[in-house]
Amino acid sequence: MPLREIVRVVGALLALGLLVSCTPSWQQPIPVDQIDFMSAGQTSSSAGATVTVSVPSQTETKQLFGTDLYAARVQPVWIKVDNQTTQDLILLRNAIDDAYISPAEAAYLRHSGSKQTKREMDVFFQESEFQNPIEAGSTVSGYVFTNLDEGFKSVNVDLLGDDLLLNFVFTMKIPGLNADFEYVDLDTLYPSYEDIDDVAAFQARLEEEPCCTFNKSGTAEGDPLNIVFVGTRQAIVSTLVRRGWQATEVNHMKSAMKTTRSFFFGRQYMYSPISPLYLYGRTQDIGIQKARHSVSRRNHMRLWRAPYNFQDQEVYIGQISRDIGVKFQKKTITTHAIDPYVDHTREGLLEDLAYSEGLSAIGYVAGSRISTEEDTHYNLTPDPYYSDGYRAVFFFSETSVSLSEIDQLLWLPEWHPRLEGSFDKAQ
């Protein structure tokens, strides 16, 4: 059969499978007190208000709402606010998801059965929504219907009073996605972790790391190692999730089908597996990505837990690149083409995370691969890349840090062009 016919048949089968899997139905919802989804919730308090957030799994959502909302890419977020301030408060839904879904819309996306059944769905969804206002001294709970996130979900809760604005940020783990990092025990990768306290010793250690990733046998060099993350695991994950970075699925049949659907139908697949590269004799410990329009265009990072800490903070060595399309090759049939100007992608990450309010400092060290038009190096695909050979070192904070408060560290003998003229708080 000609390749064109194979593509057409596969596309048609995928479309049929997608249609069948999304056929809606509605069953009697199970009462909230009979489903233990709130045990995985998180609670935070500030200035007299206490907020609890929980995100039910796909199975729990089916039980709570009597239909598979995840199939319509709708994800309910349960929120409880105990208002012990002296003011009435309003929950701002747009802060949770600026494209949030109304109860009627969520019900309509899963309408099934008779006219009476559809009306019952509408009423049930409407009554399930979080109801404003939250009067002083009262407690209100309910759902906000958001767009689906898998792996992790950042939930930003803003409460507005007469002259009061309270902000709460939660990073929720969503069950159901087979993320690659869940197969790695980051705490037992090494017999012990070396502790480095001295800044100069830490810089030297980073510069001694290999310039690049490797293939499995360690005989060929791949993409340059151009980023370093320093911080607690919670601070790093929360910051990335807030900026829309997503986990990657392990490479299995289910994820392959999702990737194929994304390719054929031009949809985003934000969790598509990324190919393995090697450092410390193993594949990446964490793969994360930010999809752009389709599976063939995304930014992605690979991170490896280093065998040492800096000032009691975890250290991750990594690589970031930007996929700009798909190309054909003999070994794997297709592979991603990367933007060869990898420093541009590295600096783009700095600009991205600077808006997260979770980045406390940024510095640069040498140690990556210098690659120029005159002396060009290649990754394993092989694609050429060009770089100044510096690694960007990101320091993460567990408390909020504004853009103007980020320390820009004078670590290089000469000012890095990216930071020239902005060393107000250099150390």
Image (cartoon, rainbow, N blue to C red):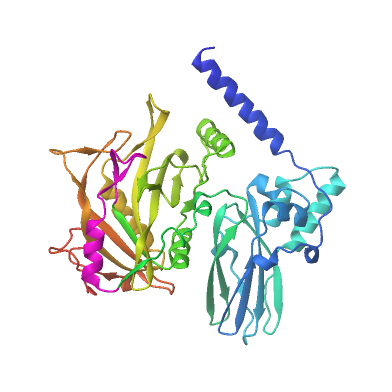
Looking at this view, is 378 or 9 the one in front?
378
- Which part of the image, by quadrant, shows the N terminus? top right
Residue segment shown in magenta: 197-225
Looking at the image, which residue is at 16% across and 42% down? 372
Q: Quadrant of the C terminus?
A: bottom left
Quadrant of the rendered image containing residue 129: bottom right
Residue 205 falls inside the magenta stretch: yes
Answer above or below: position of 154 versus 179: below
Q: Position of residue 133 (x, y in %)?
A: 67, 74
Q: Is residue 270 rendered to the left or right of residue 134?
A: left
In the rendered image, residue 82, in percent from the top left (x then y), is placed at 66, 79
Q: Quadrant of residue 71?
A: top right
> In screen coordinates, is 350 left or right of 73?
left
Position of 129 compared to 114: left or right?
left
Q: Does residue 238 appear in this view?
A: yes
Give residue 115's position: percent from left, percent from top.
85, 45
Q: Is residue 258 left or right of residue 135?
A: left
Q: Residue 146, percent across and down? A: 61, 56
Q: Is 6 situated above or below 112?
A: above
